[in-house]
Image (tube, rainbow, N blue to C red):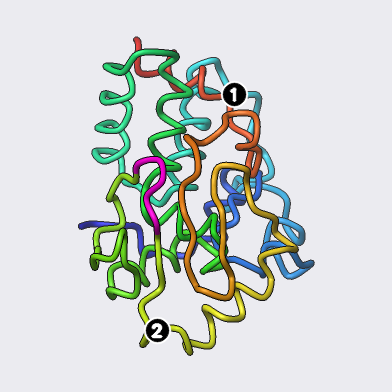
């Protein structure tokens, strides 16, 4: 599956908000946005006020880049959310949070979604006792995500788990640190999706044109 492989700090600078793409570094003063809080490029500091379309486009780019998706993938999620009952924007966020790589990240096994995606692809995780190496796999309520036995001594995973309390766990997941497993307790709660905060209605307006 295609993915963005360029420098990620410039993505945060372009969106002028932290997308938390580099894990723990994003929480320190080494964060590129802390040092240069303006868009990259020669004219980064001279950008004028965005139009309504520009504001909607930037919001779509922010969400797409936060979850590590390309345009075709993101649009497919939007179309699926639009066909579901309920509010399209909220449906979209719930779908993205139910991806296996997002749940692995939320449970604290990794410090970034990019790292979660890589570890899932490498086959480090089981879902309900079966190996799943597809980051886009959509979890259902009560599905159990478990780190494989041979992967439990991986240093970066243990380091991420040790720092999970600092980052915090959302209410829709439950972690058993000692057993290296966790579960999706309920569907993700919109009110808790605040890192970063999205205005999903702007994306609905953009795609509705």
Please name the residue that numbered disc 1 is placed on.
50
- Looking at the image, is 174 positioned above or below residue 203? below
Looking at the image, which is closer to me, 115 or 5? 115
The residue lying toward the viewer, choosing from 42 and 194, is: 194
Q: Quadrant of the C terminus?
A: top left
Q: Residue 74 in the image: state x and y as whole percent.
A: 32, 37
How far apart marks 1 and 2 lie (CA) works out to 47 Å
Of the two numbered discs 1 and 2 in the rendering, the one whose residue sits closer to the viewer: 2
Residue appearing at x 53%, y 88% in the figure: 155
Residue 76's label in the rendered image is none
Is the magenta region chiefly helix, strand or loop? loop
What is the total number of numbered labels drawn onto the structure image? Answer: 2
Q: Quadrant of residue 32?
A: bottom right
At 44% from the left and 33% from the top, the residue drawn is 94
Q: Depth check: 159 or 74 in front?
A: 159
Q: Name the residue at 47% across, 34% down.
A: 187
Quarter of the image where one finds residue 23: bottom right
Crowding around mark 2 (Cα neighbors within 10 Å: few <14, some 14 to 19, many 20+) is some
Q: Position of residue 67 (x, y in %)?
A: 44, 48
Q: Secondary structure at mark 2?
A: helix
Q: Is residue 67 magenta?
A: no
Apparent side of residue 20 relative to residue 148 in the rendered image (left or right): right
Q: Residue at x 61, y 80 (%)?
A: 159
Q: Which residue is mark 2?
A: 151
Q: Which is nearer the N-term, disc 1 or disc 2? A: 1
Q: Quadrant of residue 33?
A: bottom right
User: Start and end of the magenta stretch?
Assistant: 140-144
User: Element at badge 1?
Assistant: loop
Left or right relative to 48: residue 116: left
The location of residue 20, given as percent across then percent down, is 60, 56
Horizontally, residue 11 falls left or right of residue 33, namely: left
């Amino acid at each position: 599956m295609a993915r963005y492989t360029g420098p990620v700090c410039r993505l945060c600078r372009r969106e002028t908000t932290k997308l938390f793409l580099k894990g723990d570094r994003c929480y320190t003063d080494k964060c590129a946005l802390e040092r240069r809080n303006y868009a990259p490029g020669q004219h980064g500091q001279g950008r004028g006020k965005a139009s309504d379309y520009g504001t909607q486009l930037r919001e779509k780019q922010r969400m797409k880049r936060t979850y590590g998706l390309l345009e075709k993938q993101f649009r497919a999620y939007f179309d699926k959310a639009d066909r579901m009952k309920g509010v399209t924007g909220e449906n979209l966020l719930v779908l993205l949070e139910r991806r296996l790589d997002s749940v692995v990240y939320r449970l604290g096994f990794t410090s970034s979604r990019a790292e979660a995606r890589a570890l899932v692809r490498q086959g480090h995780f089981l879902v309900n006792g079966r190996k799943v190496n597809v980051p886009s796999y959509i979890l259902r309520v009560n599905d159990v995500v478990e780190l494989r036995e041979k992967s439990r001594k991986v240093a970066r995973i243990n380091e991420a788990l040790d720092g999970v309390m600092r980052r915090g766990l959302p209410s829709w997941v439950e972690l058993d640190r000692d057993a290296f497993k966790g579960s999706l307790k309920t569907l993700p709660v919109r009110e808790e999706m605040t890192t970063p905060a999205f205005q999903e209605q702007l994306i609905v307006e953009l795609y509705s044109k």
